[in-house]
């Protein structure tokens, strides 16, 4: 049969609100899964009817799927959600070039967040997708040759260690990749009409046991909902369908299943204007219901919004991904991209935290932003035997930096005395952090990270992205890290 492109209608699950807060955002759920076969496999089937066509034209039949020559670029997603509770492996047969196995997808509409294993010519690559941003490559190796042109891709997923390994025809090719998305949907993507797929198998890993997560701190993924109260934050854990109330350190204070349908915060009024999100576009209606206008340019795919008393509206954008402040004139006044963290993952829910901060639901963490303050970069300077890291400290804690050489273990150094934040400088209690990493070898390249780079819940998510710096052969007063 031939399946033609069509928008995939989300199937809303019956989420219930237990906390008395207005304008709850949305969550999606997979359709009822197909009956599981007898035996040890969680899922085993030829490529057939249990796939949602998200883009492109696909020829599906005889247990195989291939995009047509007229539309080689396409995506299909399996209707069954794979839980993050147990270690498992995902296996599919693939031939041709441009075939991609995706896993850990956060929806069944488009590959907005998730991991990929891609065949590109004679190369196999791993990485993850994030909105409309460029794919982030994490691993690459030569693809082993096959006799009949078909390769068996197998991804072994360990949600406890938060890693995955890739093998081809039973031989390891890329090992110990960071697992950002431990659960989600499985997808197949083709960017070449020669790519074809058959025989999807999902099975538990040997000796895999169920994971019981203690409700002591935030540990969720596919996070799309956040609400802030007086020093507390409420999020929704879609994996267990629970609302979690916690303090700003991430300690869970209470949890309960929701009781009312959850709705996205997609409309708000500010400064005499009404802002509404429609199909990812931010529409603005003027005073007294005047002519509607669309905020274009920076906003790619709006998800949720919140209005402030000063007439501003803050919008999450999963397409960029970013958070935008729209001022009273209807223009984007400020944009946050969480650059120090390596970028937002998939920002969705948003709320005001007091009068000076915002909370943003960003896939597996809550990111806290200071209103009225843009993002700052870190400054790294090098000497012959030391590296100095300086950045704006987002909260009143002791800063630290970590260093690693040639893949060795990380060594942590805490900040010097005198780096205590000055809360008079900003409403968020930010100050200047300075950490000196000493006892290094001259003329040597190191990996460096530091924290907290951005205030997050849990705090462990606020560590910076990994940077590269080199010590110098001699010791000038200052030098830039490369």
Image (spheres, rainbow, N blue to C red):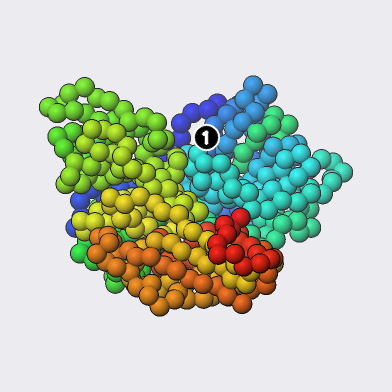
Q: Could you say which is closer to the camera, residue 211 or residue 124?
A: 124
**Could you tell whether 135 is left or right of 124 in the image?**
left
Percent across and percent down for residue 93 are: 72, 45
Q: Quadrant of the C terminus?
A: bottom right
- Identify the residue shown where x is 69% and y is 48%: 125
Q: Is residue 310 above or below residue 370?
A: above
Q: Quadrant of residue 459?
A: bottom left
Say which quadrant the N terminus sits in.
top right
* Residue 144 in sight: yes
Few, some or many residues within 10 Å of mark 1 (<14, 14–19, 20+): many
Residue 161 at least partly seen: no
Farthest residue, direction front? 476
Count of all numbered marks drawn on residues in the image = 1
Answer with left or right where residue 482 lies relative to residue 287.
Answer: right
Where residue 296 sits in the image (x, y, percent)? 36, 29
Q: Residue at x 73, y 31 (%)?
A: 194
Callout 1 secondary element: strand
> x and y percent of residue 195 in the render?
71, 35
Closer to the camera in the image, 78 or 387:
387
Question: Residue at label 1?
Answer: 54
220, above or below 280, in the image: below
Residue 184 at x, y percent in the picture: 51, 52
What residue appears at the point 72 percent right and 57 percent down from the top-left corner?
174
Q: Check the image and name the residue furthest to the left.
A: 288
Query: Which of the two residues, 403 or 100, is positioned nearer the viewer here?
Result: 403
Is residue 45 depicted above or below 206 in this figure? Answer: above
């Amino acid at each position: 049969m031939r399946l033609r492109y069509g928008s995939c209608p989300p199937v809303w699950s019956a989420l219930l609100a237990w906390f008395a807060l207005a304008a709850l955002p949305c969550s999606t759920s997979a359709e009822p899964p197909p009956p599981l076969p007898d035996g040890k496999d969680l899922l085993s089937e030829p490529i057939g009817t249990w796939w949602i066509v998200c883009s492109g034209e696909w020829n599906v039949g005889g247990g195989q799927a291939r995009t047509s020559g007229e539309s080689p670029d396409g995506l299909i997603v399996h209707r069954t959600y794979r839980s993050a509770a147990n270690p498992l492996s995902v296996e599919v047969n693939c031939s041709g070039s441009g075939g991609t196995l995706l896993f850990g997808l956060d929806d069944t509409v488009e590959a907005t967040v998730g991991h990929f294993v891609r065949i590109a010519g004679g190369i196999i690559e791993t990485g993850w997708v994030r909105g409309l941003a460029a794919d982030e490559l994490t691993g690459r190796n030569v693809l082993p040759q096959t006799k009949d042109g078909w390769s068996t891709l197998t991804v072994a997923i360990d949600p406890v260690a938060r890693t995955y390994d890739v093998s081809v025809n039973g031989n390891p090719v890329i090992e110990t990749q960071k697992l950002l998305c431990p659960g989600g949907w499985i997808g197949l993507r083709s960017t070449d009409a020669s790519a074809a797929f058959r025989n999807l198998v999902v099975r538990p890993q040997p000796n895999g046991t169920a994971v019981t997560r203690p409700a002591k701190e935030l540990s969720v993924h596919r996070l799309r909902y956040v609400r802030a109260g007086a020093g507390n934050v409420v999020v929704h854990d879609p994996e267990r369908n629970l609302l979690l109330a916690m303090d700003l350190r991430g300690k869970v204070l209470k949890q309960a299943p929701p009781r009312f349908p959850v709705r996205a915060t997609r409309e708000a009024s500010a400064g005499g204007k009404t802002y509404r999100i429609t199909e990812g576009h931010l529409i603005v209606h003027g005073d007294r219901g005047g002519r509607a206008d669309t905020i274009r340019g920076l906003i790619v795919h709006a998800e949720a919004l919140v209005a402030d008393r000063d007439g501003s509206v803050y919008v999450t954008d999963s397409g960029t991904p970013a958070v935008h402040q729209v001022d009273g004139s209807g223009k984007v006044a400020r944009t946050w991209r969480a650059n120090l963290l390596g970028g937002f993952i998939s920002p969705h829910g948003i709320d005001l935290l007091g009068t000076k901060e915002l909370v943003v639901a960003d896939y597996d963490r809550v990111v806290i932003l200071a209103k009225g303050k843009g993002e700052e970069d870190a400054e790294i300077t090098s000497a012959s035997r030391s590296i100095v890291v300086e950045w704006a400290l987002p909260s009143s804690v002791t800063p630290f930096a970590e260093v690693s050489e040639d893949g060795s273990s990380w060594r942590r150094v805490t900040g010097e005395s005198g780096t205590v934040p000055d809360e008079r400088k900003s409403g968020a209690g930010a100050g200047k952090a300075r950490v000196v990493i000493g006892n290094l070898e001259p003329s040597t390249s190191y990996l460096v990270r530091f924290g907290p780079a951005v205030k997050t819940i849990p705090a462990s998510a606020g560590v910076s992205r990994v940077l590269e710096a080199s010590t110098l052969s001699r010791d000038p007063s200052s030098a830039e890290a490369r």
